Image (tube, rainbow, N blue to C red):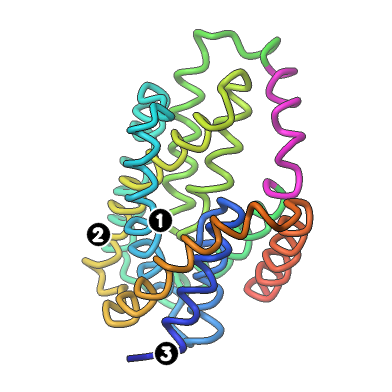
Amino acid sequence: MDWMAVISGFGVGAIVGMTGVGGGSLMTPLLLSVFKLHPAVAIGTDLWFAAITKMAGSVSHHRAGHVDWRITGLLLAGSIPASLATIALMHFTGVTKGWASALTFSLGIALLLTAVTVAFRQVWHGVGLKLERWVPPQRKAALTVASGLVLGVLVSLSSIGAGAIGATLIMLLYPRLESHRVVGTDIAHAVPLTLVAGIGHATLGHVNWELLGMLLVGSIPGIWLGAQLTRKMPEKLVRTLLCVSLVTAGLKVIH
């Protein structure tokens, strides 16, 4: 039993439970810095971690009627082909030193983007309402597919984006969608996307299965505890600490 991995899984799970932000934002930097994994292996392992931990959440949101399946379908119409194309390109070219640098850089950018989306979560709703004037309903389907395409590439390259960034894009395009349906739709989209990208990385040998198992052992009770703690801790404090850690990790990864 690797207790460091179990404790790491528990810590990330607790933060996910408290903030609702995907564990990839914290798990991938942790796999790089603490467990010294190759960037591609860290990303592949995290994709499986995200897919498995979000499955239960997706089922519960579906049962509660919190998933807009039309929006989910449109996002997947863009993200799944984009993910498959990205993985196919990695297969074709091989994971060279250049790819490792590209993966690391995209990870850093994704972390910084996630920090911005978390910090200004309340602002995006207002921006979405203003954008409604410029985005007629007939254009929303194409823009949703395009958003999925961007997420598919970003998630396949960095394992980050299906959570906070995905929710922000949904909020911008559908500002009148209730917040619980934004979260449910985002999670429902994240599960198949991270699973497809995770399978793709597994075919490249980019998953540390033993470490993944230990992380999951810790994360499941961690998510439960985090969900209990979120009622007792000020949301502003939790989000501030999360943003600081995301920016720090993002800048460290880029440099």
Q: Is residue 180 left or right of residue 247?
A: left
Observer-nearest residue: 81 or 186? 186
How far apart, in angstroms, are the residues tagged by discs 3 and 2?
Answer: 26 Å
Q: Which residue is drawn at 33% across and 33% down?
A: 63
User: Can you identify the residue that label 2 sits on?
Assistant: 199
Which mark sits nearer the N-terminus, 2 or 1? 1
Of marks 3 and 1, the one in the foreground? 3
List x then y, in percent, for residue 112. 68, 58
Look at the picture and state if 230 lies above or below 9: above
Q: Do the residues labelled 3 and 1 touch (CB within 8 Å)?
A: no
Q: How many residues crowd mark 1 within 10 Å: few (<14), some (14–19), many (20+)?
A: many
Indicate whether residue 247 is drawn in magenta.
Answer: no
Q: Specify the amino acid type for callout 2.
A: Ile
> Residue 41, labelled with which disc?
none
Q: Which amino acid does label 3 sit on?
A: Trp
| Proximity of marks 3 and 2: CB atoms separated by less than 8 Å | no
Left or right of 122, for residue 43: left
- For label 3, the residue is 3
The image's mark for residue 156 is: 1
On the question of residue 205 being in view, the answer is yes
* Residue appearing at x 58%, y 66% in the figure: 105
Which quadrant of the figure contains the C terminus? bottom right
Kind of residue sitting beneath label 1: Ser
Tally of numbered discs: 3
Specify the segment rendered in magenta. 117-131
